[in-house]
Image (cartoon, grey):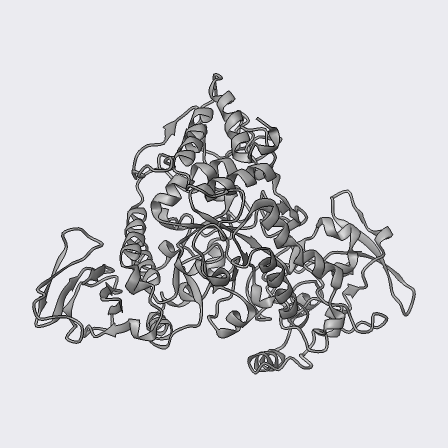
């Protein structure tokens, strides 16, 4: 065979075929849930001890057996499957979110710990990588397909920097080089680079009809980014002598003397928030002078070097006095609101999107809300764009399209990327593939995102539905008023508390997922681990109280540390999620209807019993749930307007054999605490 035609997956298969014929002396256990494509996962079975060569080979062979006919898996599926215009195919998908290092991590030698080798923390004493890899992600595709998901959303898979790492391994958002794949995601069982294993993973996904959406970060980079040495002017620099602020510092005088998010007084915060709310980006209040003075001009390229700790340092010269300063790259912090309580991000820094109008006397040479998010109108001018940086960012997605065949991207904080830059990014990618999907980590569901070219946004369901009034507000907005584009029907993500850790635990997690999966324009979204009932968050970025942060202070967080999910034992959430996605597909004609008339709240006679109906093409489905997590509630739902007199019973399709009586066109309910139901007629 001509080697130029050997695909990455074939190369992987060839190596596994050789490995399968050898004696493997080390213990290698895998979760029983990681079934081959075409098999049904059986929850609760013990982990299986396998020969890894034979095991992974069997997965690839099953993928080949179930491969979609007539497609080129090395290319995007967007031009090969029926697609929505301009990337709107995403509206009909169900998404499974993967953080490769975490999602596919497992204690293979069953010694009670992950990895631990002195040479490489992710590898155990037998040389087996126990953190997640692309090879193990391929072995998860049968499981993901069986759940009912058709698209995979990958958290960043790009090369990770290490200056300022919070945990043992560093965050995938501390991107050292967006054009390189993080090598620790390569599995040592096959002698292929991370890039080649990544290509094999995407090829395997496409063979099964699963699209791949990669997440990209355009505003930040690691503090030891490969770009720094060549382009110091793409970054902000501060006096090396300025120390970082201690997280949680409450003494405002001390806080103001150390580097961290700029400190504003209450009156300033009020003005800032009022101006931003009004959309007034003229003359936004700047940080205090002492904070601005921390920052120095970017050093000359020839003065930039790595010190003994692999940290970038340079020499900056004050244009007025000629004084020289040793300078360093500052860390980042939450950009909005200015008084946000998130811990600082010491492993990343913000990129300098705009140059100053007067480089000799720069006005905006600092990191603050008005230079990195709510760009002041005096700064955000086309002629001040940092053009070489912008071009490197614009070229990124087309490179991944041509090299790996990805189907879409999630843009980290897409609404905070300069609008004109985002327009260039989208048009460049759509020139390669006009059905390429763009998703934005935007928590608002507004027409602005449609105008910007996005196909979907993350939305805000996860943030409100657990609150007393939040669920009604969500249903009123999404259902009664309607929204202009698709959003994630997510009860959690990698930055939020786990749904099963909210009040009510899995009872809440179940009814919230059911609601989210049945709303107009919702895209069911499973954050990996959610289906296993995981309660420990991946990160503490969003919607955590100070008490939450204190409680989690000494716990490992998977965004930074070596962690794994509990794949062993039973997982009641798994069967529930599978059933919900099956019902969504079965009654898609009603659920995929987007007109406002397709949604109607139903009267239940009790504020804690909530019901809504979706209808379309002759189908009716109703979601009914008791959000009281303590009390059993009884009553009836009025259905006179949509139910004939001859209907006397309903079956809760989420629970086989669970029947509800209907009397005089009213459904009679008797609901246990947290119980949820799905009816159809």
User: Image quadrant for the C terminus?
Assistant: bottom left
Residue 136 makes an appearance in the image = yes
The one of 145 and 47 positioned closer to us in this rendering: 145
Residue at 45% across, 36% down = 106
Which of the two residues, 228 or 680, is positioned nearer the viewer here? Answer: 680
**Residue 242 seen by the camera:** no
Callout count: 0
Relative to 373, is 605 on the left or the right?
A: left
Horizontally, residue 212 falls left or right of residue 380, namely left
* Residue 93 quadrant: bottom left
Residue 187: give x, y in percent of width and height.
Answer: 54, 33
Rendering quarter of residue 508: bottom left
Horizontal and vertical percent position of residue 398:
62, 53
Quadrant of image for the N terminus: top right
Residue located at (62% from left, 67% from top): 423
Q: Foreground: 493 or 63?
A: 63
Residue at the extreme right: 322
Left or right: 233 in relation to 661: right
Q: Is residue 291 left or right of residue 90?
A: right
Residue 127 in the image, given as x and y percentages of width and height:
55, 26
**Position in image of residue 426 (x %, y %):** 59, 62
Q: Which residue is drawn at the image coordinates 49% and 17% (left, top)?
A: 22
Res. 665 image quadrant: bottom left
């Amino acid at each position: 065979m001509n080697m130029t035609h050997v695909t990455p997956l074939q190369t992987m298969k060839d190596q596994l075929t050789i490995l399968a014929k050898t004696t493997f002396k080390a213990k290698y256990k895998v979760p029983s849930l990681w079934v081959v494509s075409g098999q049904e996962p059986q929850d609760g079975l013990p982990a299986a001890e396998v020969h890894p060569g034979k095991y992974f080979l069997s997965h690839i062979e099953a993928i080949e057996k179930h491969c979609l006919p007539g497609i080129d898996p090395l290319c995007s599926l967007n031009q090969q499957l029926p697609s929505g215009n301009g990337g709107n195919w995403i509206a009909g998908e169900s998404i499974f979110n993967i953080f490769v290092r975490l999602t596919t991590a497992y204690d293979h030698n069953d010694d009670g710990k992950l990895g631990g080798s002195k040479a490489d923390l992710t590898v155990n004493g037998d040389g087996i990588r126990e953190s997640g890899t692309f090879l193990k992600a391929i072995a998860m595709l049968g499981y993901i397909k069986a759940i009912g998901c058709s698209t995979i959303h990958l958290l960043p898979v790009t090369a990770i920097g290490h200056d300022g790492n919070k945990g043992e391994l560093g965050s995938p958002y501390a991107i050292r080089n967006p054009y390189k794949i993080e090598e620790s995601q390569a599995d040592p069982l096959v002698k292929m680079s991370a890039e080649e294993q990544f290509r094999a993973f995407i090829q395997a996904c496409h063979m099964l009809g699963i699209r791949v959406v990669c997440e990209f970060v355009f505003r930040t980079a690691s503090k030891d980014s490969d770009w720094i040495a060549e382009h110091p002017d793409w970054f902000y620099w501060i006096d090396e002598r300025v120390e970082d602020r201690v997280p949680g510092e409450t003494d405002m005088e001390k806080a103001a003397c150390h580097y961290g998010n700029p400190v504003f007084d209450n009156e300033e915060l009020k003005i800032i928030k009022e101006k931003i709310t009004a959309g007034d980006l003229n003359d936004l209040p700047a940080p205090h002078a002492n904070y601005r003075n921390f920052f120095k001009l970017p050093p000359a390229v020839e003065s930039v070097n790595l010190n003994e700790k692999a940290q970038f340092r340079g020499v900056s010269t004050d244009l007025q006095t000629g004084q020289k300063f040793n300078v360093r790259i500052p860390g980042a912090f939450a950009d909005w609101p200015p008084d946000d309580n998130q811990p600082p991000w010491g492993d990343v820094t913000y990129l300098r999107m705009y140059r100053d109008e007067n480089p000799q006397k720069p006005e905006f040479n600092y990191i603050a809300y008005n230079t990195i998010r709510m760009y002041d109108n005096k700064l955000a001018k086309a002629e001040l764009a940092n053009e070489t940086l912008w071009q490197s960012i614009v070229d990124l997605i087309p490179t991944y399209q041509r090299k790996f065949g990805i189907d879409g991207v999630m843009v980290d904080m897409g609404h905070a990327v300069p609008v004109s830059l985002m327009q260039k990014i989208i048009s460049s990618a759509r020139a390669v593939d006009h059905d390429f999907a763009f998703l934005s980590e935007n928590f608002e569901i507004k027409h602005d995102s449609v105008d910007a070219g996005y196909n979907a946004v993350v939305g805000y369901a996860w943030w409100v539905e657990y609150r007393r009034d939040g669920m009604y507000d969500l249903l009123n907005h999404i259902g009664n008023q309607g929204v202009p584009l698709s959003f994630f029907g997510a009860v959690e993500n990698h930055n939020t508390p786990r749904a099963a850790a909210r009040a009510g635990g899995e009872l809440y997690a179940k009814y919230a997922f059911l609601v989210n999966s049945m709303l107009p324009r919702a895209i069911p979204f499973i954050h990996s681990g959610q289906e296993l009932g995981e309660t420990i968050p991946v990160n503490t970025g969003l919607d955590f109280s100070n008490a939450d942060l204190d409680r989690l202070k000494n716990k490992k967080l998977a965004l930074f540390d070596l962690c794994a999910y509990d794949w062993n034992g039973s997982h009641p959430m798994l069967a529930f999620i599978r059933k919900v996605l099956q019902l969504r597909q079965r009654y898609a004609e009603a659920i995929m209807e987007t007109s406002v008339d397709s949604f109607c709240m139903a009267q239940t006679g009790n504020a804690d019993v909530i019901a809504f109906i979706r209808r379309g093409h002759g189908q009716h489905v109703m979601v009914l749930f008791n959000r009281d997590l303590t009390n059993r509630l009884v009553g009836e739902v009025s259905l006179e307007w949509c139910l004939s007199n001859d209907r006397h019973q309903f079956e809760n399709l989420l629970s086989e054999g669970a029947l509800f009586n209907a009397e005089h066109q009213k459904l009679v309910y008797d609901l246990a605490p947290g119980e949820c139901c799905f009816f159809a007629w």
